[in-house]
Image: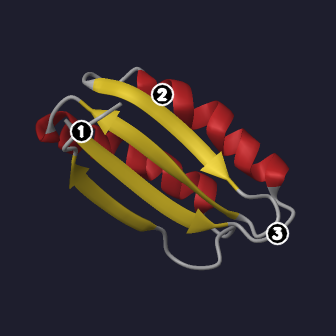
Amino acid sequence: MYARLVRYSLGPGKRAEAQVLADHLAPLIAAQPGCASVTIFGDEGNGEGGVFVLWDSEADAMTAAPIIRPLLDEHLSGRVEGPPDTRLFEVFSTG
């Protein structure tokens, strides 16, 4: 299992923009083969947020990336304070 973590900052008071991103992307990510779960999170106070996805395999994560990333970039374009930080981790254990 693998975890993709993308972190970004929209800036304070951007809850509505973050919700639009979540409402649009979460079902698209969840529909990708090998997606075990997707969580989109944020902090309205400081505007930081992110996307956390568990994938069945590294191959599933890599296959979904070129499909999902352009959609994420479209939502973030001109709205973020800096480039998003994207990482892929091997999962050692889940609860």
Expressed as whole percent of the image width and height from the top left, the position of residue 87 reads 31, 61
Q: Are marks 1 and 3 in contact (CB under 8 Å)?
A: no
Indicate the quadrant where residue 76 lies.
Answer: bottom right
Q: Is residue 86 above or below residue 42?
A: below
> For the point 53% across and 24% down, which residue is it?
27
Q: Quadrant of the C terminus?
A: top left
Q: Is residue 89 above or below residue 31?
A: below
Expressed as whole percent of the image width and height from the top left, the position of residue 25 reads 55, 36
Instruction: Check residue 93 in the rendering and tell me which mark sits there, or answer none.
Output: 1
The residue most toward the right is 13
Q: Quadrant of the N terminus?
A: top left
Cα distance in 3D space between marks 1 and 3: 33 Å
SS state under label 1: loop
Q: What's the residue type where badge 3 is placed?
A: Pro
Q: Residues within 10 Å of mark 1 (few under 14, many from 20)?
A: few
Residue linked to disc 3? 12
User: Which numbered disc flags the more N-terminal residue, 2 or 1?
Assistant: 2
Q: Residues within 10 Å of mark 2 (few under 14, many from 20)?
A: some
